[in-house]
Image (spheres, rainbow, N blue to C red):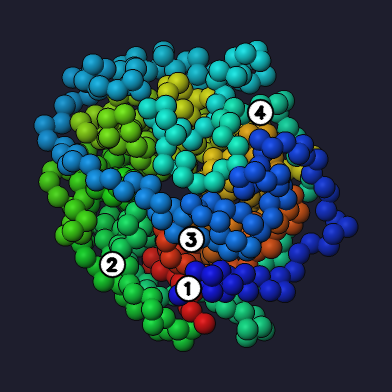
Amino acid sequence: MDHAAAMRRLEALFTDVKLDKPETIVKVETKRDSKCDVHKKNGSTSNLFTNKRTRSYGSSNIGSRRESMPALNSHKIYDRRRGSLGLPNTPSKRDAHPSDFPTSLRKHPLASSTSSLSYASNLRRDSLSSSSKQSLYRFSTDSLNGKRNSWGAISRGSSESDVAIGDRWEDKSTPRNVEVDNTEDNNPARPKFVAVTALEDVQAVRCAEFHPGGQLYAVGSNSKTLRICAYPKMSDLRENHQTYQPTVLFKRTKHHKGSIYCLAWSPVGDLMATGSNDKTVKLMRFNSDTSNLEGEEVELSMHDGTIRDLCFLEDTSNKSSLLISGGAGDCKIYVTDCATGTPYQALSGHSGHVLSLYTWGGAMFVSGSHDKTVRFWDLRTTGCVNMVTPITSAGTRQGSPVASLCVDPSGRLLVSGHEDSSCVLYDIRGGRNIQCFKPHTSDIRSIRFSPSAYYLLSGGYDNKMVLTDLQGDLTLPLPSVVVAQHEDKVISGRWHPSEFSFLSTSADKTATLWALPPI
């Protein structure tokens, strides 16, 4: 399907969506600072909070109200193939030494990480001088070697990387409860996402992730089973499509001793990692040609609780990957060198279970925790560089456990999903909430920007997948529609890297692939 036509189909989903009455809305006070412009085009003066429908994230101008869904991979973010990251003869943790890791990032061995991070874990921006703020709070998307990474091909507007850190900002606005329309409505002209395939398991399916190339996806469940499935052809998809079982290319039962809670692919797709409530992380090589895991897997046992999330960072200084993992137990976030399969750093700071991790390129990543905070980490400084508590209760400083989060490709806009069903948009550079709204009626367990950040896909314990339109003024009520529904709680949702489709996993024991049929 032509992307322009598909974009029009997406926009048609929001026809006749009902919003809150204008008089009930309390306008959020914001500063019109160019540094806060998430979706600005080069040379324009449009503002973050009034991002008009002429945003360009790809290498070319997208045009009015058009989203380039292949933005994540169209400019070949990770198009170079590295040599094999073989994982033989993995040294034990007690044998690890910082000299074993030839990169400037690896400054602290695991044994001394607690003391070395004590300063970073206690950072508070209120106590820093202005000069300290300038040196510490640099929210850039630079690569690990100090140069702009491949996101530099994207139009970002300003090239500055300094963060405007102000006093902690209190959102006094009322959370916006948007009336979401079910896909089963009375408007026959409105397009609907259809369930293309549904993978059935004997227990709840917790996680699913697309391979970076988009040709397949992996699924992990409470049954301890790991599967790799083929992404089907969509050319003949119609609204009367009959859902079928996907083609399973690889299956491993008893992959862990416990439930598979999370999984992740490396940026080039040659590594996969899984995390479990058996307190282990498994790191494996993947062959894209055969769609199989190869060689001996590495089992990491540094965690003392359930691993809740994983993500890979690309170390461009030596063309290798770093694995970030976090969860319950000691609430630490561990950094593992994938070339050696050895954890070399433990990041302290959270006082509650780490529930979500996300990176958008370079050395930066964010973590969300049951302690109600979001922490920003920069591996170039070996610690936390900022901590915020998204406000979910009007007129207070109160938050809610952060169950899910992500950052838009430009690194300027954070969105967090909370256990009290709140969703908070946060301006990273301005250091303030933009708005809090409630697209669900229960815990928001998954949240992701579309590749060009025009839409927000969220999944919740109300059994629904909701699509929220982020085009227009971000301080006003945002139109949302239910685009998919399960028979039980939705646990995760993921966009395809280049197609108008997404995966959802659920406690109803299925992993479903949804897509928007052509006209």
Judge from the rendering whether residue 386 lies leftward or rightward of residue 278; answer left or right. right
Residue beneath disc 4: 164
Q: Classify residue 458 by image quadrant.
A: bottom right
| Amino acid at dot 1 | Asp
Judge from the rendering whether residue 39 lies leftward or rightward of residue 502; answer left or right. right
Q: Classify residue 363 by image quadrant.
A: top left
Q: Are marks 2 and 4 in contact (CB under 8 Å)?
A: no
Q: Nearer the viewer, mark 3 or mark 1?
A: 1
**Whole-percent x and y of residue 6?**
52, 72
Q: Do the residues labelled 1 and 4 touch (CB within 8 Å)?
A: no
Q: Which residue is drawn at 21% across and 20% down?
A: 100
Q: Are marks 3 and 1 in contact (CB under 8 Å)?
A: no
CA–CA distance in space, label 2 to label 4? 44 Å
Q: Nearer the viewer, mark 1 or mark 4?
A: 1
Task: Give the mark nearer the N terminus: 3 vs 2.
Answer: 3
Q: Residue at x 67, y 67 (%)?
A: 180
Task: Give the mark nearer the N terminus: 3 vs 1.
Answer: 1
| Amino acid at dot 4 | Ala
Judge from the rendering whether residue 120 lies leftward or rightward of residue 398; answer left or right. left
Residue beneath disc 1: 2
Q: Residue at x 67, y 19 (%)?
A: 126
Image height of 478 relative to 92, above or below: below
CA–CA distance in space, label 3 to label 4? 30 Å
